[in-house]
Amino acid sequence: MPALRSLGLFLLLFVLAAAPAEAQRVAKYGADFLAGGIGGRALGMGGAYVALAGDVTAGYWNPAGLNATAYPEVAYMHAERFDGIVQFDYGAGVFPINTRSTVGISFFRSGVDDIANTLNAWDAANDRPTPDSISFFSAADYAFFVSYARQMRSNLSIGVTAKVVRRGIGDFASAWGYSFDLGAQYRVGRFQFGLNIQDVTGMLQSWSVDSGELAAISEVFGQDAPVGGSEIVLPVARFGTGVTLPLTQDLGFTAGLDFDLAFDGQRAYAFNTGDMSFHPRLGTELTYRNIVALRAGISDVTSSERFGTEVTPTVGAGLNVGAFDVDYGFGDFGGIRQELGYSHRVSLKYTFAQERWSRANR
């Protein structure tokens, strides 16, 4: 496993940091660590949540949805991806300022830890390994969001999220990135509509590298070491619609349909026209007395000549116990071919449902 992780390190180094210092290029996967989504409920519904987001997780899915919260909320989620190699953690909080305004914060970390650095683990003079020279480091991405939502009319909310991203590969390379998301939600009867434009101004990421740390790459691999530079993550427009219906006095049904437009050609197997790709998502939820929920969805649809059309399903469940909501989502992160392992997502949400914290009293 250390050898595989070391190989993964150098792949990351060359993919993320090999731009010419004076150039700025489009990063196809520059913020992909955020693309997997958050929240057990949303992920159990295939990520079809742009119109339905109405809790603390809306800071990620659609900041306009934060205005649907009646009380302050906090949430946490842990997930393991690629058969446990990648650890993902998310935490967030939301606070209603008054009857029309809401603020929220979100924090993300996605990382691979305990990667073996074997660059100095060979004694060339004596032609033998030197295990004591092996060190370990992490390749981790962090993101911090600050969101604000405003109720414009009784059925219309808008929101904005300011994003700061920090990426690092041990002491080898690091980058800062900044951007904004804009969102809106509109309600007509039982139907909801949502729009979230991620990285609306483009996310500019500036990479710097430690030339001293990377000098060994040229010696070991016989290639030029990566250099710093800048890259830009292009916007993604996410459209969504949803409906919530009472089936009986105890049963409720919710359905959502999302459609993403990406402009950087980031997926080889996505439906696309040139550099524009299309990503549909579908989700459903059946609730009993707003206590127990069962969910199912489709998080991805891909097409290729080799594999044909493939659908990535998701399932999930939720339980409400007083102020606590526990949600679980299960999905095959690598597609139905199961090449990259399953993905389990568990999230916990707590609502400060005391009268003194109520939005109505602000």
Image: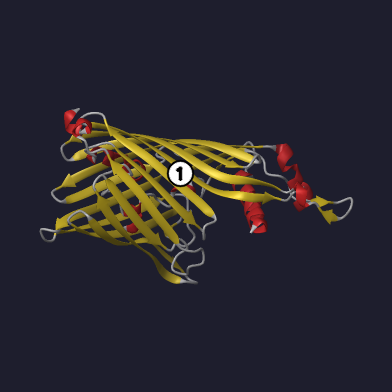
Q: Identify the element where label 1 is drawn.
A: loop
Residue 206 is situated, as x and y percent measured from the top left of the image, at 56, 36
Which quarter of the rendering shows the N terminus? bottom right
Amino acid under label 1? Leu
Q: Is residue 264 above or below residue 351?
A: below
Residue 196 is situated, as x and y percent measured from the top left of the image, at 33, 44
Residue 87 is situated, as x and y percent measured from the top left of the image, at 50, 51
Which residue is drawn at the image coordinates 18% and 51% (left, top)? 191
Kindly tell me whether residue 222 is visible in this rendering: no
Q: Is residue 339 above or below residue 348?
A: below
Which quarter of the rendering shows the C terminus? top left
Closer to us: 144 or 281:
144
Kindly tell me whether residue 188 is visible in this rendering: yes
Which residue is drawn at the image coordinates 58% and 41% (left, top)? 168
Query: Dot 1, crowdedness within 10 Å: few (<14), some or many (≥20)?
Result: many
Residue 310 is situated, as x and y percent measured from the top left of the image, at 41, 68
Residue that extends furthest to the front in the rendered view of this protein: 322
Q: How many marks?
A: 1
Q: Quadrant of residue 361?
A: top left
Closer to us: 236 or 257:
257
Which residue is drawn at the image coordinates 71% and 45% (left, top)? 225
Closer to us: 270 or 333:
333
In the displayed structure image, the side of residue 10 where residue 262 appears, left or right: left
Colour scheme employed for the rendering of this structure: secondary structure
Residue that extends furthest to the left in the rendered view of this protein: 249
In the displayed structure image, the side of residue 288 where residue 116 appears, left or right: right
Residue for badge 1:
234
